[in-house]
Amino acid sequence: MSTFKINLNKGLMIGGSFKVRKSEDNGSPTSTPTTTPTLTTTPTPTTTPTPTATTTSTPTLTTTPTPTTSPSQVQSPIGFVSQTQGPPHIVYSGNGSDSSPITGYITGNSLDNSTFDLVLVANTTGTLYYNLIVSSEAGYDFGTLFVNNNMVWAGSGNQSSISSIYVEAGQQIRIRYNKDESSTVGSDRITINYLYIGNAPTPTVTPTNSVTPTPTLTPNQSPLTQTSSSGSPYVSYNGTGTDNDRIIGYVTGNLNDGVVYQVVFQATRTGILYYSLTASSESGYDYGDLIINGNNTIAEVTGTSSAIGNINIAAGSTITIRYSKDGSASSGLDRVIINYLYIGGPTPTPTTTPTTTPTNTITLTPTPTPSFSSFSPLAVMLTSGSSYTVPNGATSMKAWAIGSGANYGAGAGGTAYKTWSVSGGNSISYNVGAAVSNSDFSSFGNNTTVTYNAITITGCGGGRRADGTTGVYIGGQFSGGDGGANGGAAGYFGAGEYCNGAVGGNTTIGTGQATRFQATDIDGLFAVLTLLGINYTLPPTYSFNTNPNIFGAGSKFNKYGDYASGGIGGGNGSGTSETRETGAVILYFT
């Protein structure tokens, strides 16, 4: 049977042609000139003795009143440039100020194979604040934000971003919604909850005897300097790594298979490294990583997952952003997106004010309170490799070990979970149960294990029991940890229609011959999958001979050789050459 992999080139359509509606030019605000008061004298009367002349005193300092403008003359912080469509595809209002933020949405409106752009321009220099939400077909329909054609953020499925970026007057701001050639999921849109530029600093006159603060960095000092790169077109970014000039960009596989591309920076000062990464890739196969000093993996993303956090970093440390591709297929944008990467100022060192100690007194010197950077929750899904480093700042880790699905009997893998107290920099060992051979219908699933601090949890492969024995028509069991769930078993629904087991036990979707098995939540697993942007919900309808790749779902097939594949941990048994039913390790750090 020939190899079948899903949608090699599904993803964003960048740079499609579109109609442009020219914006109206209201002109620049016109100032009303103010006439400087003229010195006047009181005329000398002719019929009385000449008094001492009096004059109308002129103020020593004359302040010229600020020119006034009418509301229609005020330039909005964000201006309109063009849009590919009007309503119902693009709907928005507001002028981009903090009192009137731009709000609205861009929707595909169920129109397949289309791209819709709203193009704006920054009329002032300052910080662009945005809150965007995407509700779409995960991995296929995307909402994106660009500044001067550099991608700042991309989301798909049910993803959102609340953040900010420094922009300069004249820079273009583009919000895009892109639909692939089939299917509509969710609201089919990117929603703009708000988009605005805060007030730019007001110029002030420096008093004669004032002291101008010395900036922390001179313009030539970049907190992050590039030491190596795979180069264009695989690496693209701008910024120097300051808070006001954050590094944004991406590292892409450029649709090539079996490759690794990366960019390496070096920290030129000690401080806190802030990062936000988003994957747009083949989930579970192509990965983006943030690596410190060559071997300490701080964050890993795949599919449409994101990682946001910060870590203390010393001057001289290296920071690697790497994108690794497996041997086949590409999904999404085929890249890891750098939403931002920058070093904040060094953590202030507590200082004490010198005091005079009176005689016969005891002085207690206060112990400086340590300064800890906050840790943002981080989730990762691992389907390859054997070790993972606890990110700095994390104190707790919850892990799920999910065995791979079986072909023989087509039961789903079992799942074990456990919560550990952890320390940053420590190593986690794991082994992912490999997908079974699609050509061998006598294959049971394979076990997945996670080990930390000498404690191991095991999610058994489909058809495997915790005591090491096997059974044909059972889901995998589990052992160790705080608990778990057995995988679901296969079912037969007449007329040659079969459904294979799902992770966590079978949640039935549909009736009769249209029945399918969807994964069941296991102690908060679904909430973490949502954070990762991984879909675990079967669509309301399905078609045979497709690869929906829904996490934990069992495959479906009939006696005629038609099939709809399952997802990670689900029962296989379809006889197809795809290997979606591999095991997985899910880690959630807080």
Image (cartoon, rainbow, N blue to C red):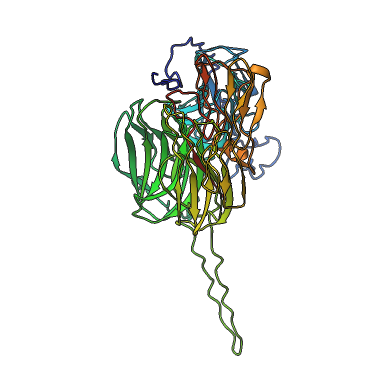
From the viewer's side, name the closer residue of 158 and 505.
505
Q: Between residues 311 and 471, which one lies in front from this camera angle?
A: 471
In this rendering, position of residue 109 left or right of residue 248: right
Q: Position of residue 286 (x, y in %)?
A: 41, 33
Residue closest to the eye, 277 or 361: 277
Q: In this picture, is 384 found above or below 158?
A: below
Location of residue 43 with respect to 456 vertically, above or below: above
Residue for point 30% across, 30% down: 232
Of all residues, the one furthest to the right in this rendering is 48
* Residue drawn at 51 percent across, 38 percent down: 306
Is residue 397 something one can see in this rendering?
A: yes
Residue 401 in the figure: left or right of residue 285: right
Work out which residue is located at the far bottom of the displayed protein and give it: 360
Q: Is residue 199 visible?
A: no
In the picture, measured across the screen, residue 497 lies left or right of residue 1, that is right
Left or right for 379, reference 256: right
Residue 437 image offset from top left, x and y in percent: 42, 31
The tally of labels here is 0
* Res. 105 image quadrant: top right
Q: Position of residue 364 (x, y in %)?
A: 59, 79
Q: Residue drawn at (55%, 44%), measured in percent from left and top?
A: 465
| Percent coordinates x, y for residue 85 in the rendering | 55, 12
* Quarter occupied by the N terminus: top left
Rendered view: 392 above or below 562: below
Name the residue at 32% across, 28% down: 233
Q: Is residue 70 above or below residue 44?
A: above
